[in-house]
Image (tube, rainbow, N blue to C red):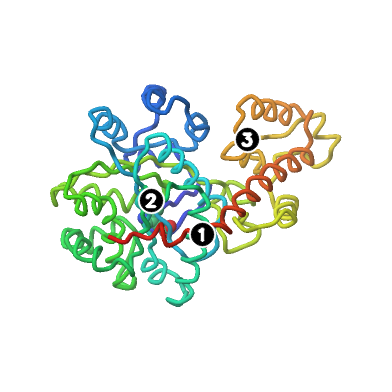
Amino acid sequence: MANKVTPYEVEGDVDYKKLVKEFGLSIIDENLLNRIKKHTKELHPMLTRGVFFAHRDLKWILDEYEKGNKFFLYTGCGPSGPIHLGHLQAWYFTKWLQDKFNVELWFQFTDDEKFLYKNLSYEEIQKWMYENMLDIIAVGFDPEKTHFIIDTKHASLMYPEAIKVAKKITFSMIKATFGFNDSNNIGSIFFTSVQAVPAFLPSIIKKKKMPCLIPHAVDQDPHFRLTRDILPRLGHYKPASIQCSFLPPLTGRQGKMSSSEASKGILSIDNAKTIANKINKYAFSGGQHTLEEHKKLGGNPDVDVPFQYLRYMFEEDDEKLNQIYNDYKSGKMSTGELKKYTIEKITKFLKEHQKRREKAKKQLDKFIYKG
Ligand code: TRP
């Protein structure tokens, strides 16, 4: 099973069990779910369904929280194109964490990273950053408790801290962690030290050591593995994390959703017609070739992309999800019906998101950290 996962490459049918071993992650088990539930009263479906499946030091975050030492959340966005459902998935979960634990969120925009890694001009990146910010505000984060940090705009805040991290990282560590070689540009070699900064910046600003919890997709773990090695040597806590698997692209379980090809992702700004077209045309189906065969043999919801979208984010009702699973597997529910249901769910969700996205234009200024 081909399998390559770094922040800059996700290939093949990702084997999460193997990744947990390779990266040294801990699985979110029943005990931990119960501990979370003590504070949140209910559990998010992304937790009970194992979408957010792994962590580092989450128990410690809860220990500290129970002692009254509140954590802050840190996550981020690399602005290089439109936002797709894979991004939204992790951010809607982050909003749930913010609401349930009533904590601050520090949101990093790595415009430097995308400039260094992508074939885009600085101006194009700035345009995408503006567009992406609207989506992030539309998720519904609390403007009083959410701070946007833009790497190039908040450089006077970020840079003195980034160099302290950078001084502890050698080129050979970067090569080993990210698979880089001598032909990678020197900015990209430095970059991981910038992504480390928001994990302790609030502690610097508030002159108080605060635990940090980072919700992120599992491909970002290499950055934070390095961060965790270095921060204690600078007198900071190691950041904890809660990590999710990838929402599959329309084409099936290989790789992750992306905004660069129509066949790979559904975008936050797609309208009803586009959503229906994409699902009908591209979504990998676990169904049989003909309706007759499907009725006889049943489908495979485990590989069916529309079903997976329902499981990841669009069907909140567990009973209903189970029923769909069983009906599709037995052949009672056809591929056409499953697609239609999923299209309706996604369309409804994105319509609401898009309304809030329009309003976000007026709220933007409130979110940008003023320090
Ligand atoms: N590097 C991430 C990306 O390419 C953006 C990012 C910055 C991030 N800080 C983060 C993602 C913290 C998750 C958590 O999209």
Residue ID for mark 3:
315
Q: CA distance from mark 2 to mark 3?
A: 27 Å
Q: Tell me which amino acid carries mark 1.
A: Leu
State which mark lies toward you, 3 or 1. 1
Helix, strand or loop under label 2: strand
* Quarter containing the C terminus: bottom left
Image position of 269 with respect to 50: above or below: below
Residue positioned 70% across, 39% down in the render = 286
Instruction: Give the farthest residue toward the right.
Output: 292
Residue 67 as seen in the image, left or right of residue 36: left
Q: CA distance from mark 1 to mark 2?
A: 14 Å
Residue positioned 37% across, 38% down in the render = 102
Q: Nearer the viewer, residue 288 or 70?
A: 70
Residue ID for mark 1:
134
Tag 3 or tag 2, which sits nearer the N-term? Answer: 2
Ligand 1: image quarter:
bottom left
Residue ID for mark 2:
146
Helix, strand or loop under label 3: loop
Horizontal and vertical percent position of residue 82: 55, 62
Q: Nearer the viewer, residue 366 or 195?
A: 366
